Image (tube, rainbow, N blue to C red):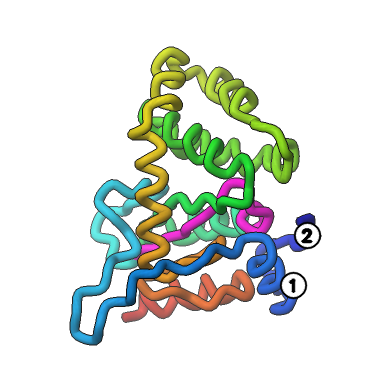
């Protein structure tokens, strides 16, 4: 599905456009597992192994985004997250978790490529590359694994190690573990954003900013 939704700092997105884009293009069946009962431990939106874009010392606020690299709305949100990182990165921990939508042919390929790059310390570089080039490969009906490999070459990665990581089942399992964690948290679409384990109702950039400001004020 193509969408003309664009996010820019200071702009508002019509609720109908954003919700429709998410619901139609990125819906996933909810987990069959029941949410934790009242009083029971609820899972955290961030795991020890989660990839952190920023982690300032003494940070008490964490933003977690479950995303799909092929999701157009995620691509539109990417520059907003980058701007928020520039503004809040010295106070807020920004975390990325994989949530590849099964209906997107190359979403898992992209996540695996990013995870393979992460194993060489290049998570952020490959993460950024995916969104910067999304228009070139998104919504295609053929595998773009070779294109993603060319990104790894451009980043100067050890290609033997990259290829081994891409074919290693453990790499896909690492991606799938994020996906399953998201489903247990009630994630069914991308992007889904949590601030200090509280899922925010995502309608505009202001919703993210307001959640961060409220958490920082506590």
Q: Which residues are magenta?
A: 62-76
- Front residue of this view, candidates 70 and 79: 70
- SS at badge 1: helix
- Extreme residue in the front direction: 32
Q: Is residue 121 left or right of residue 141?
A: left
* Residue found 65% across the figure and 31% down from its top: 143
Q: Is residue 97 above or below residue 161?
A: below
Task: Please tell me in which quadrant of the rendered image residue 123 appears.
Answer: top left
Which percent across, then down, holds residue 12?
Answer: 70, 74
Which percent across, then down, holds residue 101?
Answer: 56, 53
Q: Is residue 89 above or below residue 157?
A: below
Q: Is residue 171 magenta?
A: no
The N terminus sits in image quarter: bottom right
* Residue found 48% across the figure and 75% down from its top: 200
* Residue found 33% across the figure and 52% down from its top: 55
For the residues labelled 2 and 1, the Cα–Cα distance comes to 9 Å
Residue bearing the label numbered 1: 17
The C terminus sits in image quarter: bottom left
* Residue found 39% across the figure and 69% down from its top: 32
- N-terminal of the two: label 2 or label 1? 2
Residue bearing the label numbered 2: 3
Mark 2 residue crowding within 10 angstroms, few (<14) / some (14–19) / many (20+): few
Q: Is residue 173 left or right of residue 207?
A: left
- Cβ atoms under marks 2 and 1 closer than 8 Å: yes
């Amino acid at each position: 599905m193509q969408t003309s939704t664009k996010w820019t700092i200071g702009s508002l997105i019509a609720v109908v456009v954003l919700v429709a884009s998410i619901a139609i293009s990125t819906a996933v069946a909810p987990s069959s597992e029941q949410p934790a009962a009242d009083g029971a431990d609820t899972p955290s939106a961030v795991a020890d192994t989660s990839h952190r874009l920023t982690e300032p010392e003494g940070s008490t606020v964490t933003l977690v985004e479950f995303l799909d690299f092929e999701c157009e709305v995620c691509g539109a949100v990417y520059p907003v997250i980058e701007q928020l990182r520039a503004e809040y990165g010295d106070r807020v921990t920004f975390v990325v978790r994989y949530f590849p939508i099964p209906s997107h042919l190359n979403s898992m390929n992209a996540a695996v490529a990013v995870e393979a790059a992460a194993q060489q310390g290049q998570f952020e570089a490959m993460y950024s590359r995916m969104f910067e080039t999304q228009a070139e490969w998104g919504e295609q009906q053929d595998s773009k694994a070779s294109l993603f490999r060319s990104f790894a070459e451009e980043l100067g990665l050890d290609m033997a190690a990259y290829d081994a990581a891409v074919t290693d089942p453990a790499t896909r399992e690492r991606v799938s573990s994020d996906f399953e964690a998201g489903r247990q948290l009630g994630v069914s679409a991308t992007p889904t954003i949590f601030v200090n384990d509280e899922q925010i109702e995502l309608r505009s950039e202001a919703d993210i900013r307001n959640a961060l400001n409220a958490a920082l004020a506590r």
